[in-house]
Structures are given as C-alpha cells and as structure tokens.
Image: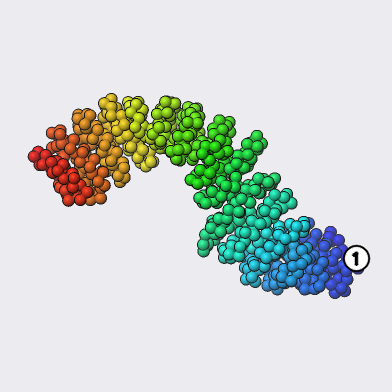
Amino acid sequence: MAAESAHDGLPKLIESLSSAIEKNTEDVSKLLDSIAMNIQEEKNEWTVNTVLLDHLQNIMSGESDVNITKSAKVISELAKTCSGREMCVHSKLLTLLMKLLRSRNDNISLLIQVCRALGNICYENDIGRQLILDADCLPLLLHLLEKSLTISSEEGRNLRSVSAGFLLNLLSGNDEAQEKAVDLGVVSLLCKILEIDGSASSGEEACTHVLLILGLLADPVCRRCPARDLADALLDEHLYKVAVQVLGASQSPDVSEMCLELLHSQAENEQVKVYLANAGLCELLIKLLEKHKPQVEDDEARNLMKMACDLIALVLTGDESMNILYSEGHGEVFHAMVSWLGSDDEDLQITGVLAMGNFARTDKHCIQMVEAGVSKKLLALVEKNNSPDGDIRLQHALLSAIRNLVIPGQNKSIVLKDGLVKAVTPMLAIPTFPVVFKLLGTLRMVVDGQEDAACELGKQRDLVDRLVKWCDTDDHPGVQGEANRLLAWLIKNSRNAEVLSAMIEAKALPCLVKMVSVEHAVMQIEALIALVLTVVMRPDSVNSLLEANIGESLYKLLKEHGASLSKEVLLNLLCLIEELVKVDNMKKHLLEKEVVSVLKPLLTRQSLVESSDKINRLIATLDAG
C-alpha cells in the first residue's frame, strides 16, 4: 500500500498508519513524516486522536530508532497546541519519553526530538511540568546539556538549543525546580553554553533560551513563592564576563536586548558592578552607542539606547566600580563621559552629566575634575538649561554633579569665579521641587566659607523671599529642610548687616526659630548659630524673635528633649539665651515663658559641668527680672 501524502486529512493518515503497523510495512516511517507535516501545516487546535497516541507509544516502545525519532517529532508538533498538550499529559507517555532520554543517549537526533516533545508538553502546563519533575527528570536534563557541550557538530548545537528550551519551560513558574537547578550547578552550565553559542549566529536560539533562564533565576518577581533569593547564585564573575562578550559579539537585536536586561537587573548589586567594570561593559556600551546612534530612529531602538545609558550610570554608582573606571582621571570611560557632555543626543548628554556626578564622589576626584575644566563644561550646560522649560532630568543631574564638585574647600572659589551663581540663579523660577531641592543644596554647599558668595546671595531679596516660602512647604520635606538650612548658612557665612536686614524684612527669623525644634541636631545647631549671630549683630532683631515666640520654643525644646539633646546643641542654646537676656523686653519674655525652670535641670548634666557657672548666671539674671 502506498503511503498517503501530508495533504491527506489527519484522520485518513492515522487510519493508514494503523494499517501499516498491523501489516508491519515500511510505510510507517513515511506516514509519520506525513502526519508530522500535516499537524505542522494546519496549526489547528486538534482534538487529538487517542488512537494516534497509542500508535506513537507502541512505536516508541519498539527497536527502530528512525521511527522512534519520528514519533517523538509528531508528539512535539501535537504539543505545540493547548489541546495537544492536554492529551499528551499522562504518565505512560511521559515515562516512555523520559526512558528514551536515559537509554538512547547515543542517538543525538532521537534525543533532540524527545527533548522537543517534553519541552513543548511543559510549555505553560503546570500538570505536565510537575509530572516530569516528579520523575526526577531535572538531573537527567542537566546531564544531557552537559553532554551537548562535548558535541561540536551542528547536531550538538541543536541538542543544546532544544535542551535549553526544555529546561526553560520546565523551570518556568516553579520555584522549587529553580532552586534545585541552582543547587545542581545550572548557572555554571548555562555559562558554558553562552561561551560556546553566544558568539555564533547559529547559536542564537540556544543563547536566547539561556538568557531567558538566567532572567527567571535573577528576577524574584517571576517566582511565585520563593523560599530563598537566588540572586546570590548569579554572583559569578565569569558569568558576567561571558555575558559582556556575548553582548559584544551578537548580531541579534533580541539577544542584545536580553543581555542588557539581565545585566541591568543584576547591576544593583555592588559586587556585580565591580564584575561589570572589570569585564569592560561600559567601554563596550560606549562603543556600541556611538556606533549605532545614527541608526536610532524608532521608539524600540531609543528604549534600548536608554537602557544601555542607564546601565553605564548604574555601574558608576558603585564606589569600587567607579574608581576602576575613573582610573585616576585616565580611564577610557571617564574621558568618554566628559566628551558626551557636548553630545547633541540628549540621552548621551544626560548620561555624561550623571557620570560626572558619580565620579565626583571623593575630594581627590573633585579637585582633579575641576582642574581638568569639567566644572566649566557643566556650568556652560546649566546656562543653556536654567529656565522652567528646560529638561528636568538634565537640570537635576547638572545640579547634583556641581554640588558634588564644590564640596572640597579649594573648589568653591574656583567654581564661583567661573560663574556658578549667575548660571544657577535663574533656576529659582523652576517650579519642580526635585530640581529646587538640588539647587538649594548646591547653593548651601558653595557658600560654606565663602563670604562674598554668601553676601551676594543673601542680599537677593527674591531668593530670600522664596526661601521663606519654601520653609513652610509641606509638599517636599527635602526642599523645606534645605530652605531652612540655606537661610542659616547665608547668615553664618556672610555675617553681613545688609543680609540680616534682608532676612528680617523677609520674616526669615521665625523660620529659624522653628528650625531650633527640628529632630536633627545638625540643623538645630545651624539655627542656633544663625540666631546668635543675628542677635549680636542686630540687637533690634529681638522684636522679630518676640513675634516668633522664641521663649516658648526654647522652653518646649528643653522641657521635652533637654535630657537627650547633644552637648553641642545645649552649648549653642546657652549662648543664644545669654545674648537674649541682654535685652530687657526679651528677658521679661523668657521669664514669662518659664525658661528658668528648664534651665535648672541642666546643672545636673555631667557633660555640662564646665558650663555650670554660665547656667547659674543665666538663672540668676532671669530670676532678678
């Protein structure tokens, strides 16, 4: 009897297969080919004929490797559909397929089709997945993957691809299986596959499966009820070195994207940042970004570019990795990032600015960077982007970088001379609080020890008015805190009568009185010093302090927190009271607010023994009215 072609209907082909099996003819092999092709071409949700499955099981129990291989191929095609997978999920068929994996491991073509069949049965199929895992197939599959590494032929590559696909489907959605695979050394195995197939176009499928598996293991969100975090299993320096090599060698956009996603997901870990810095990831990304930038024309390509830029910035957030890439100011990445400050591509430019902020995390780096002219480049960018319609991301990054650069004392005067105040002052009009927060922090840092700059800023009524307004904002606690601190720092560093006049007229003193009662000791000290200087230089300022009810604030602070206040806070507090009692109406105010009663307990503080005479004098002065 002649075998039917694939174009004949499946029921007719199954009928012919039944006859061929019964008569034991050679048509079985051809009919299996036709059935597989028919299923493949139709791509329908077949209601799978149980007769066909029985025939396939019988054939696979026989001795013909050719027919066993073709039967496994038919099953793999059937299992591509939901209904087909459901019909294939029964222990007898699965047991038979797994037995073939164990007993026919010398027949690569057969192993490929059996893996395809089992892998397809596992796809989005918890029942089939669990049956296979219960049969202890995971160690067998990993052994098969290990075996595939020793086969250099195209068959070996195909075996790696389908075995990795099988493993992906087997581990997907199963936390216990993922943990067991890690314990069995799957990460090292996957790394070896990437080494072999990652740089070859023919290895793209295997590489894709491996990267997806690593993504599963790396992402706790993908795990339903993780008993433990598997991220530590991926802390393998060699794995990241290989992943970077794959990223550099691959011609596949999909593989490149998966590499980037994997590396990005792990780069929050400080040790991984070091691995990636040593592996040359940032240098590679710079090269790829500069090479492909002209071809970035759609959203998908732009998003990939953004991810690469984000990854560079993320690696630079680590202290050790940043130092590696800075390399005493001679690093390739550092110089590339400086050049990106002048890029016409906004993503590259912002990445360059972010990088400057990250490199400027030690005084030594900051000094070297200012000497190299980095601060001038940043200020030039600020002048082009200091209006409310500027790019918020760029403004935020610029201010962060400049703030870091002016932390070292010797840099402040240099950057001020380069025009910092003129460049950033227009940014006061920007309504975005995250930018305002960075702006105020930058100004506060640069006026430290810089009398001229503090005077210049403190005399700007518009600035002082805005600061007073921001001191009362509840929309951004960071802005509120920085506004209060900048007021105090302007007074402390200027020590200028005109600045104090601007402060008094703008009603800034009540803000400092409130600041005395905040939780942070540093801010309390700053407020107290500013108030002491104000009272000493402008005795008439006590009227504003009376209006702010300073006595009640001091009483409440000492009553509620006196026992826990630091020695430095208390000493500055005593200095303030000492100046206040020199003014009669203020002395009366403090007496009415019962400040004496909260001063007396300070005499028992061991840390204030040296100040006991001063405390007694203040008590006596107040008691005398």
Residue 243 percent across, percent down from the top left = 62, 50
Mark 1 crowdedness (10 Å alpha carbons): few <14, some 14-19, many ≥20 = few
According to the picture, the residue beneath numbered tag 1 turns out to be 2
Q: In the picture, residue 206 is in which quadrant?
A: bottom right
Residue 209: quarter of image: bottom right
Percent across and percent down for residue 518 are: 29, 44
Residue 14 occupies quadrant: bottom right
110 vs 410, left or right, is right
In the picture as drawn, the residue positioned furthest to the right comes out as 1
Please tell me which residue is depicted at 58% across the width and 64% down the height of the picture. 183
Looking at the rendered image, the quarter that the C terminus falls into is: top left
Q: Position of residue 283 (x, y in %)?
A: 60, 41
x%, y% of residue 338?
54, 34
User: Helix or strand or loop: what does disc 1 sit on?
Assistant: loop
Residue at image location 76% in from the left, 67% down from the top: 106
Seen in the picture, residue 271 relative to 436 is either above or below; the reply is below
The residue that appears at 63% across and 39% down in the rendered structure is 287
Q: Nearer the viewer, residue 35 or 183?
A: 183
In the picture, the quarter occupied by the N terminus is: bottom right
**Residue type at tag 1:** Ala
Colouring scheme, one of rainbow, by chain, secondary structure, one colour:
rainbow
Specify whether 574 is left or right of 448: left
User: Residue at point 68% right, 46% down?
Assistant: 249
Is there any visible trace of residue 330 in the rendered image? yes
Can residue 122 be seen here? The reply is no
> How many discs mark residues in the rendered view?
1
